[in-house]
Image (spheres, rainbow, N blue to C red):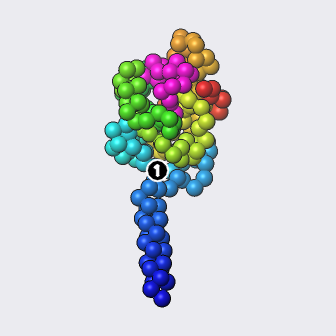
């Protein structure tokens, strides 16, 4: 009888630990379904490279938000560092908030922070360590962009421009989408496959 009582206590302790572990280690649930063009993006929360939590709602730009999935080690993403920073510089005063999201488990927060500093990236970069937000958006390469309007409706998904080797293109496709958003027009070139 005593052995049965001890076994029951052990089972209860293990069950409690498992339940506690689930509550402690599981992050906020990912939105239920993948977002599509023309659909409002569900709010989410991710940490920045210093561990501070930010919701999408807290980062939202007055006119819209440009989310860019980026990496520290991807040569394609790195080829666009200056073009991404130029977008931030040129459009932040016009009410667009640029937010980087790094979804790579192999790139820890301190590496992402150092990378941003070394490359002059002054926009906020969030970490998506479990890829839950990347999965929600369907992001599969870096860099890959998602432009939300002031109501957080997804208006553009795709690439910055057509050639990572030609800095002269200056993220022209993304800039065109931003200008069309400002003009209240339908964004013409959304959905062009990003590469990375």
Look at the numbered disc 1 and give the secondary structure of its residue: loop
Q: Quadrant of residue 76?
A: top right
Q: Is residue 146 above or below residue 167?
A: below
Provide residue 38's location: percent of width, then percent of height.
60, 44
Q: Is residue 4 left or right of residue 121?
A: right
Decide: is 38 above or below 28: above
Residue drawn at the location 63% of the way across and 26% of the way down: 195
| Label 1 CA crowd tier, 10 Å (few <14, some 14–19, many 20+) | few
Q: Where is mark 1, residue-wise?
A: 43
Q: Is residue 164 found left or right of 26 in the rendered image?
A: right
Specify the farthest residue to the bottom.
1
Residue 171: x and y in percent read 53, 20
Q: Is residue 116 above or below residue 170?
A: below
Q: Residue at x 48, y 78 (%)?
A: 7
In the image, what residue occupies the spot 37% across and 20% down? 118
Residue 193 location, quadrant: top right
Q: Position of residue 192 (x, y in %)?
A: 66, 29
Do we see residue 9 in this rendering? yes
Quadrant of the frame with the C terminus: top right
Q: Nearer the viewer, residue 76 or 173?
A: 76
> Is there any visible trace of residue 96 in the rendered image?
no
Q: How many marks?
A: 1
Is 97 inside the magenta-drawn segment?
no
Above or below, comparing residue 72 to residue 48 in the picture: above
Q: Measuring 61% from the left and 36% from the top, which residue is drawn there?
A: 140
Q: Which region shows up in magenta?
A: 68-85
Relative depth, front residue between 95 and 50: 50
Residue 13 x %, y %: 43, 72
């Amino acid at each position: 009888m005593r052995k049965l009582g001890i076994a029951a206590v052990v089972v209860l302790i293990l069950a409690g630990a498992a339940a506690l572990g689930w509550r402690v280690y599981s992050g906020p649930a990912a939105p239920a379904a993948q977002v599509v063009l023309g659909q409002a993006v569900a709010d989410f929360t991710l940490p920045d490279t210093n561990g501070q939590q930010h919701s999408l709602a807290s980062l939202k730009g007055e006119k819209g938000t440009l989310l860019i999935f980026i990496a520290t080690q991807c040569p394609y993403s790195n080829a666009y560092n200056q073009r991404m920073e130029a977008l931030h510089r040129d459009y932040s005063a016009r009410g667009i908030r640029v937010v980087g999201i790094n979804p790579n488990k192999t790139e820890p927060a301190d590496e992402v922070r150092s990378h941003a500093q070394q490359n002059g990236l002054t926009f906020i970069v969030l970490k998506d360590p479990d890829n839950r937000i990347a999965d929600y958006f369907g992001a599969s390469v870096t860099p890959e962009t998602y432009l939300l309007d002031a109501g957080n409706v997804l208006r553009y998904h795709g690439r910055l421009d057509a050639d990572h080797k030609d800095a002269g293109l200056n993220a022209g496709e993304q800039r065109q989408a931003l200008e069309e958003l400002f003009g209240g027009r339908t964004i013409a070139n959304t959905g062009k496959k990003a590469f990375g």
